[in-house]
């Protein structure tokens, strides 16, 4: 578990030491004796300024500069939005993952069966075409212009809240190429990822390393049963008839086969119809035709895992698979609350600076909420983010002294513990409610 003093130290190292190291590496500051900003104070100004006001004008950023001890006019801030500053901030983003900030395991027994619950996913920030030479876009037939786009690959530990990986890549890059796809995981931990990370070779390697995984299957997957007969995934589930649930040991794949426990659950018709609508919409957005197999397989929830049934029942696996969406909620928070994909300028250099500075502000925000409220199953990240935003000016004023940073974080922790909680829901329970229900009412597979 990371303590508040450790978080204070990490924030100071990120916003000061890492900035100074990037400055030395890139030779960013040309005339230190005449510069109003150092690399550190400029980083602090932008990161904590955008943390407080994601849509900040240069006038508000000048106020942020004053809080870190730099008296400048708004125009002076505006002049710092250069490609050199963007390169500086990008280097600091890369170094932000050198420190791991983690809470005690959240009080959900189902998650505590594992040494970690690592979720892999990515989100894309569409950029103006002028930035295509920096980050190449996704292409495709979507109406959205994607000549330039930045992909952010993230690894999040849902047990401790630790942000374990943040990769930057071209928007067109495959998730398979991201660093989080190949990062070593702790023995006894669980890996959850969407189909963008689907790779039987990676899953086989994880099994050899005693790492658990729970995954969907590609619609084109080949299934070989205990008798040695091979069928397509669709043909296999169709042989099950009208059963509501099924599980058993199979081999998945053709050339490289993976031993797996297959879990099958038939879904209500309205759920299947909703899935088909989403499949067709996604296909339209990409300018392709949805496969007949994908549309037919919408009738079932199908998972594969290497977790033995005595450790995880089928019913528990179906709920556990839903927690992967927590990382989607994190991305939504970063975009809607942190506005990492919004800016109030058309200048390419400033846009890059804003994107990197806002990503760093989200790292700082995440560290604060990890030690402030991650241990609570009913935490509300939206409410927690607002608390952190409200305290951002105090963080800026305290950034030079670890002791003062610690005091601000302790105050934030007290506020988060009291106010950053979700209300329970009866009709559509929150994910944490479903997980806790499994703890108190063991489900039968």
Image (spheres, helix red, strand yellow):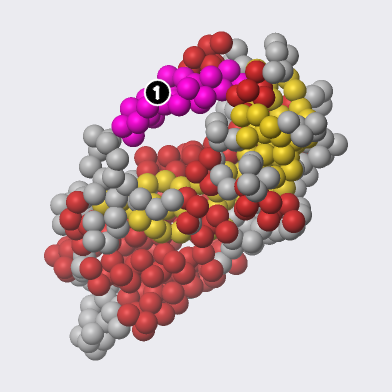
Please provide percent x and percent y for residue 430.
60, 27
Q: Please tell me whether residue 18 belongs to the stretch shown in magenta.
A: no
Q: Which image quadrant for residue 133?
A: bottom left
Please say if 439 is above or below 88.
above
Residue 136 placement, left or right of 129: right
| Screen quadrant of the N terminus | bottom right
* Magenta segment: 275-301
Please provide percent x and percent y for residue 322.
61, 33
Please say if 424 is above or below 411.
above
Please provide percent x and percent y for residue 57.
21, 53
The residue identified by callout 1 is 280
The residue that appears at 44% across and 43% down in the rendered structure is: 331
Of all residues, the one furthest to the right in this rendering is 310
The residue that appears at 45% across and 77% down in the rendered structure is: 17
Please say if 422 is above or below 276.
below
The residue that appears at 53% across and 19% down in the rendered structure is: 296
Q: Which image quadrant for residue 348?
A: bottom left
* Residue 262 seen: no
Q: Which image quadrant for residue 51?
A: bottom left
Dot 1 lies on which element?
helix
């Amino acid at each position: 578990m990371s303590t508040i003093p450790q978080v204070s130290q990490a924030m100071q190292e990120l916003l000061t030491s890492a900035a100074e190291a990037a400055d030395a590496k890139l030779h960013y500051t040309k005339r230190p004796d005449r510069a109003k900003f150092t690399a550190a104070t400029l980083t602090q100004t932008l990161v904590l300024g955008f943390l407080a006001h994601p849509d900040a004008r240069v006038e508000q950023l000048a106020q942020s500069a004053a809080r870190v001890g730099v008296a400048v006019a708004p125009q002076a801030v505006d002049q710092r939005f250069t490609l050199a500053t963007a390169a500086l901030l990008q280097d600091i983003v890369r170094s932000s993952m050198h420190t791991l900030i983690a809470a005690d395991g959240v009080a959900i027994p189902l998650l505590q069966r594992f040494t970690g619950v690592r979720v892999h996913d990515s989100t894309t920030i569409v950029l103006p075409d002028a930035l295509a030479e920096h980050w190449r876009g996704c292409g495709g037939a979507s109406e959205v212009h994607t000549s330039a786009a930045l992909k952010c690959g993230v690894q999040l530990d849902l047990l401790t809240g630790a942000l374990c990986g943040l990769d930057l890549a071209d928007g067109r890059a495959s998730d398979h190429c991201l660093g989080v796809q190949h990062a070593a995981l702790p023995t006894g931990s669980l890996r959850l990822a969407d189909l963008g990370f689907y790779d039987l070779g990676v899953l086989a390697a994880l099994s050899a390393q005693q790492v658990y995984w729970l995954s969907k299957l590609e619609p084109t997957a080949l299934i070989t049963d205990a008798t040695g007969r091979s069928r397509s995934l669709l043909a296999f589930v169709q042989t099950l008839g009208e059963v509501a649930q099924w599980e058993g040991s199979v081999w998945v794949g053709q050339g490289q086969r993976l031993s797996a426990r297959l879990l099958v659950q038939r879904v209500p018709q309205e759920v299947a119809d909703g899935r088909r609508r989403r499949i067709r919409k996604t296909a339209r957005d990409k300018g392709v035709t949805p496969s007949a197999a994908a549309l037919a397989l919408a009738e079932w929830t199908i998972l594969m895992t290497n977790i033995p049934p005595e450790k995880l029942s089928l019913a528990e696996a179906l709920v556990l698979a839903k927690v992967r969406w927590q990382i989607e909620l994190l991305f939504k928070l970063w975009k809607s609350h942190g506005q990492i994909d919004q800016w109030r300028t058309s200048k390419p250099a400033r846009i890059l600076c804003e994107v990197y500075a806002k990503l760093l502000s989200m790292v700082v925000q995440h560290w604060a909420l990890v030690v402030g409220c991650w241990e609570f199953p009913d935490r509300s990240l939206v409410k927690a983010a607002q608390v952190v935003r409200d305290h951002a000016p105090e963080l800026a004023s305290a950034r030079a002294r670890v002791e003062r940073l610690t005091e601000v974080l302790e105050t934030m922790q007290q506020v988060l513990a009291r106010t950053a909680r979700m209300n329970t829901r009866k009709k559509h329970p929150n994910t944490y409610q479903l997980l806790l229900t499994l703890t108190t009412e063991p489900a039968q597979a």
